[in-house]
Image (spheres, rainbow, N blue to C red):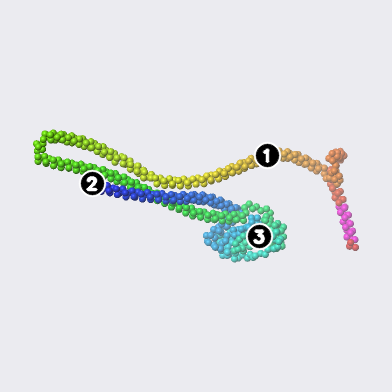
Amino acid sequence: TSEMKTTEIAIDDRENSISEWKSEISAAEVEIRSIDQEYQTVKDIRNTATDRRKEMWRAEHEVEQEKNGVKQSLKNAESDLRHTMNRSQYASLNLAKKIAEEKNLRGYFGPLCELFTVKHEKFRKCVEVVAGNRLFHHVVDTDQTGSDLIEAIQKAKAGRITVMPLNRLSAKEQSYPGGDLLMSDVLPIIDQLEFHPKYRKAVLQVFGKTLVARSLAVASQYSRKYSLDAVTLDGDQANRKGALKGGFISFRHSRVKAVADIREAREKLQEIESRLDGQEDSLSQEEQKVNEAIGSLSKLEAKKKHLLRLIKTKNEDIVLAQNEQRSFMTALEQLKVSLHKLKLRIDKAENQIVSHQEEMKTGVRDKLSSKESSELDALTEVVKAAEAELQRLSDSRQKVELQRNELQNLLDTNLLKRQEELNDEINEMSLDQETEKLDRLTHEMTILGEKIGELDEKLNETESSLESKKHRLGTLQKSIDKLQEKSDDKIAQLRNSAKEIEKLLSKRQVLVEKKEECQTKIRELGSLPQDAAKYKRRSIKKLMENLKSVNNSLKKFSNVNKKALDQYVNFTQQRNNLVMRKQEQDRGKTAIKELIE
């Protein structure tokens, strides 16, 4: 009985433990569902932040490419500026800036060319012509700052520089000619420059007494009239003292343009670097969000794994407790059966004891009649038969109990474990979890569908752009083919023209030789007589006939010196001219005498 009570207590303990563990499993499953929801939310945040980070990376790459392009433009502009001056001048220019930066010279403002901008590019040439090398004079606030800078340059042995201390410049405001004529013919060059008012003295020193004129004639006129220098847009100069200077000026590398390009490139580079800094900050924030989301996901995954391990452990404990409970219940049933058997045996033994005691007190068979004795013998036989049947049933019961124990063992060792495994799989593949997993996958599939839609749109745009590019390429190819055909035609024409030119050159050579021959004959002919003009209107045929006749007539004078004859004719003509001049002087002398008298 005490063993049965102990078994019943163990069964109740197992039942309470199973109920407690099931409650813990339910709470863990609720927490897992909450974790799955939070996991999906954090995953969406991570995916959004990751997409934004990719966009920022792409934008940053584009800005980096733009920055590289601006750097190359700055490098090209600096190269153009370097080619406009000699090496020592460029070195001293850069060294002056470096020294001013290292020594923190607040009074150093930089070279003059960096302190102003030209309003319109058409004035760049005349500004550069007027300023010349003064564009690279360094503007400082005081002569002391200039002395410090020059001393540092001399110590570095980096050439020489010219400074423009603002406290020593005596440039004054210039009065310019006014009126409507000024607006159409000339204008002050300083009005075409933009600069800070504090640099006005330095700008006046260089450009204050110069006008921009419409032409060199207008420049010369105004420079003489108003004692101002003048320059044209082409760079021709008219000095106030009357000197003119001009001609072709090569501006393949313009200093003013190079400085303007450098300034523009540096401003753009500074603006791009500012944008990059902002993008780097935003990118850092997005990366921080991504890292935080990844950290949160890792924590949620670890927590979920812990809860799943807990559920698995509790399920194993429940299965083990259920097995123990079944074992205890089986043992309890066996104890109950054994107890019942013992009670039956005890009752039977007590009845037998009572019967034997009564039989011992009386002689039963002696007192029985023959009929009763017969009945007793019959009953004895029935009892024996019943005992034999009881023994047979007991043996049969033992066999059945043995089969039952074998089946119970099979159930405990195989089927219940298989049931436990199936329960674990069912718990792991619960409907709620599968539903949540399906919802999560559906949500991810929706997001992927949206992304695929965006990519399809971009792909369609790219394909349409590609088609337009192909169409454009086809058009250009047709244009190229047409131009190639025209080029082939031109080449054929050039070849034909070359052949014609060769023919013309050959003809020209023949004509040149003929011309030289005619000139030789003309030289041999000597000087022409005064009446040669009358032969100009005659035909060549008639002249050739006359020439033949004259040549026949001249044959009899073959011994005469032609050169002496020519000299005689020339001297005779000179003598006649002198006689005529003497007659004119005589008449003038007579007229003067008459006027005096």
- Tell me the CA gap for discs 1 and 3: 52 Å
Q: Is residue 436 visible?
A: yes
> What amino acid type is highlighted by mark number 2?
Met
Mark seen at residue 489: 1
Query: Magenta residues?
Result: 578-594
- Give the percent coordinates (x, y) of residue 568: 85, 47
How far separated are the C-alphas under marks 1 and 2?
Answer: 121 Å
Q: At numbered mark 2, what does the secondary structure look like: helix, strand or loop?
A: helix
Q: Which residue is mark 3?
A: 189
Q: Which residue is mark 2?
A: 4
Of callouts 1 and 2, the N-terminal one: 2
Please state which amino acid type lies under the numbered disc 3.
Answer: Ile
Q: For this rendering, which residue is in front, 548 or 288?
A: 288
Distance between mark 3 and mark 2 Cα atoms: 122 Å
Q: Is residue 302 visible?
A: no
Q: Is residue 300 left or right of residue 341?
A: right
Magenta stretch: includes residue 226: no
Disc with the residue nearer the chain's start (3 vs 2)? 2
Give the camera-side residue of 117 and 279: 279
- Mark number for residue 112? none
